[in-house]
Image (cartoon, rainbow, N blue to C red):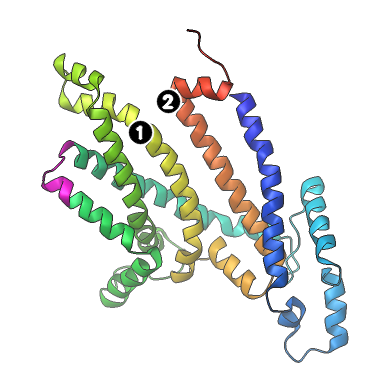
Amino acid sequence: MLRYTLKRILLFIPLAMALVFAVYFVMDFTPGDPARLILGEWADESQLAILRADLGLDRPFLARYAGYLRRLVFHGDWGTSYRSRTPVITEILRKAPNTFALALLGTLSSSLIGIGLGILAAVKRGKAADILANIFTVLCASVPAFVLGMVLILFFSLKLRALPSNGASSWRHFILPLIALSIPASAGILRLTRSMMLETLGTDYIRAARAKGLGEGRVILVHALKNAIIPVITSMGMHLGYLLGGAVITETVFAIPGLGSHIIEAVRMKDTPVVLAATVFLSLSFSFTMLAVDILCAFLDPRLRVRFDGKRGGR
């Protein structure tokens, strides 16, 4: 397991290099001049030239890319913001808690909804509960989070005035964003849980457990769910990454001061170091999340531990 973990960590190095190159390329070749955006349209050309030299924008693309990688890998320097002239890692660590809280709570709530309704739909296959769960899945999967967010703001904030529509100063500010994120995300978990539970409930060992007289609740929640939950846990990890990306739009809709709104503002101002650092930071977070999910699944299923360790069982 240790060898597998180290291999996954080392694999992130070329991935990060390719990611930095892609973001650097896109940010460099999109229209706009960071120096002019900072100083304004009426800035003098000599002032613009001085600022470009100060920001390193006068150097060739590949030289700037190689220099950024060298500073990041060997010195842990994530860069300095063009606008605020402060280390971008400081800004990211200040904005990240809201984004991670939103993504983690969204993953938890969507998982509880999806797993609960998925188990119910599998147990009540073909009945009213199963039909309603399938309708719920289709409706949730077809509504984007930002559309649902605007509908929630219109109804709960503007009409009922029951919940705030923007900010992050109290727990009440997170209710609407969480609903907007978790409801669409729960559709995939519900569908996967239902299919895995149906497959597991039809196996011989479940029929044997029922034949032994075990209670239906114990059969479903202990024996069936234990084997059906492993693919669902992997899906939950994927949904966490999806919600980290989805928070970019949701934070903008609800005006939450997190990484999402920070990235959008940085893209608008062509603040390349901020966009690079935030992208790498989110990718690193997602990679370690999926690694943690793989390790958790290996503890739940010994067969996965054998595969990760590279061992083969005897005949």
The three-letter amino acid code for the residue at tag 2 is Leu
91 w.r.t. 293: above or below: below
Residue range highlighted in magenta: 123-131
Identify the image quadrant of residue 86: bottom right
Q: Secondary structure at mark 2?
A: helix
Q: Residue at x 88, y 86 (%)?
A: 46
Q: CA distance from mark 2 to mark 1?
A: 9 Å
Q: Residue at x 21, y 55 (%)?
A: 135
Disc 2 packing (10 Å; few <14; some 14–19; many ≥20): some
The picture places residue 253, in percent across and down from the top left corner, at 44, 70
163 w.r.t. 126: above or below: below
Q: Which one is in front, 81 or 68?
A: 68
The picture places residue 105, in percent across and down from the top left corner, at 41, 50
Question: Cβ–Cβ below 8 Å for labels 2 and 1?
Answer: yes
Q: Residue at x 19, y 28 (%)?
A: 217
Q: Which one is in front, 235 or 217?
A: 235
Residue 178's disc number: none
Q: Which residue is mark 1?
A: 229
- Indicate whether residue 124 is drawn in magenta: yes
Identify the image quadrant of residue 89: bottom right
Left or right of 196, for residue 11 = right
Q: Farthest residue toward the top?
A: 315
Q: Which residue is mark 2?
A: 300
127 w.r.t. 229: above or below: below
Question: What is the number of callouts on the image?
Answer: 2
Q: Residue at x 16, y 26 (%)?
A: 216
The picture places residue 76, in percent across and down from the top left corner, at 77, 49
